[in-house]
Amino acid sequence: MDGSQASNLKHNVTYDDLRDYIEEVDKLGELRRVQGATWEEDIGMAAELLLHSETAPCALFDEIPGYPKGHRVFTNFFGGRRQNITLGFPPDLTKFELSVAFNKAYQEVVQRPLPYETVETGPVMENIMEGDDVDVLSLPTPLWHEGDGGRYIGTGSFNVTRDPEENWINVGTYRVMVHDAKTVGFYISPGKHGRLHRQKYMDKNIPMPVCVVVGVDPLSFLMSSSEIPYGVCEFDIMGAYRGQPVQCVIGKHTGLPFPANAEIVLEGFCYPDKLHSEGPFGEWTGYYGNPEHNGPTLDIKAIYHRNDPIMLGCPPQRPPEEQSRYRAVVRSALLKEQIEAVGVPDVQVAWCHECGGGRMFTAVSIKQRYPGHATQAGQIASQCRLGAYAGKFVVVVDDDIDASNLEDVMWALCFRADPATDIDIINRGWSTGLDPSIHPDRKEIGDTTNSRAIINACKPFHWMDRYPKVNTPDKETYARAQEKWGWLLNTNQPPPK
């Protein structure tokens, strides 16, 4: 299947909530159930092993010491064949085919949001803690990384806020740290919609109502972490993608909506004069990007949860890991579109590689048509809207190289690029303070720019016909080899009769 065929696939999300999703994953044989792992160390250690592997299963932790049986933690949902069903596509698509198919479906639903609907109640209201009964410590929040400043209940979560002036609802993913039984803190990066909401409340010196949805299905979580246009409610995009409105309960204390089938919801207020130290927390770069700082807190007025609640854990780690795999899928096809949109022809595949967190290492394959074609593709990939923020390396390769395969890309880089003549440098690019290679003194004065390397790893256009022939079979021969001898790679598969 090529990219054009993948773009014609229709998505079909076969699960409604996190419990349905776990059942679907179990059917694929990609679920592991774990009993007795501790929140203090074991769950974080296990996640460290699982999340870095693209083929590792997901894990459902139960019987966590100190907590009732049934209070569970689920992690590593975006990997294996299940990452396809997460987005509503057949499990046998390649990751580039998945990227193309998802991008087409997502761009369509963004244009036609489906407003959420309010309902009186739902499974999330099966248990309610209010007043003195509020105790966020009653939930088995793991310590995800040993260097973290505390336990982070909000990793696979989202925060619901309302613009106090324009009245629209935002649903965004921000890290949430447990302070004590009735208080959590959350960090929001500058420029994010939730940060804009919070600043408006702070400027008015009034408390901001917030709902933190901790247990939710993976598709809803991923939609909440996508770049939705300003003023658009993510619940409406979730509903449009599913083809049915999200059913929401209205919080008693805040008046904010949250999914009726969520697992766990914290409801409360963020007060302008209440600050607490937050962090550090291991981030998506694989470093502790932001030091401990005083940040706003959420005073929890109510906790709602289902019977036997399940927490969705998606802790960022050194890439490649779960979040970078998702970022690669949702960004790569869109990057290809943006390169083509300015007139660069014959772009085959663009891939925002997982090893760079889906941002800092990009590969683009082209079918070379003219001198300078590779340079043009690399420069545009580096500076178009999607590639500009936090980019660092762009490698352009020929069409015989699978740009989504890191080993293929590095083979081309090693044997087709000349360091002295094939690397261009762009200075003062748009980056982020989370980049650990930017000097602290520059960050202190607000200079978070970086440089970019554009590497031409294509065969030289002027003498392509004289370049040595590769000693690998063509696609047809390789396909025949796999069909006939692929069983040798699987120790559990007997030879054909």
Image (cartoon, rainbow, N blue to C red):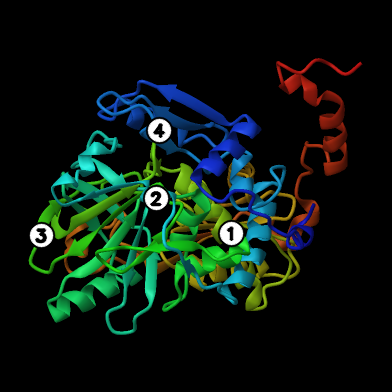
Rate crowding at label 2 as few (under 14), some (14 to 19) or many (20 or more) other CA atoms within 10 Å.
many
Mark 1 / mark 3, whichever is N-terminal? 3
Residue 345, image x, y percentages: 72, 71
* Residue on which the image places disc 3: 275
Residue 372, image x, y percentages: 65, 70
**Location of residue 143 with respect to 189 vertically, above or below:** above
- Contact? badges 2 and 3 (CB < 8 Å): no
Q: Which tag is nearer the camera, tag 1 or tag 3?
A: 3
Rate crowding at label 4 as few (under 14), some (14 to 19) or many (20 or more) other CA atoms within 10 Å.
many
Residue 428: tell me if it is visible.
no
**Location of residue 346 with respect to 329 vertically, above or below:** below
Residue 176: tell me if it is visible.
yes
- Tag on residue 124? 2
Which three-letter amino acid code belongs to the residue tagged 3? Leu
Mark 2 / mark 4, whichever is N-terminal? 4
Depth check, front residue: 1 or 15: 15
- Contact? badges 4 and 3 (CB < 8 Å): no
Q: Is residue 389 left or right of residue 146?
A: right
Mark 2 / mark 1, whichever is N-terminal? 2
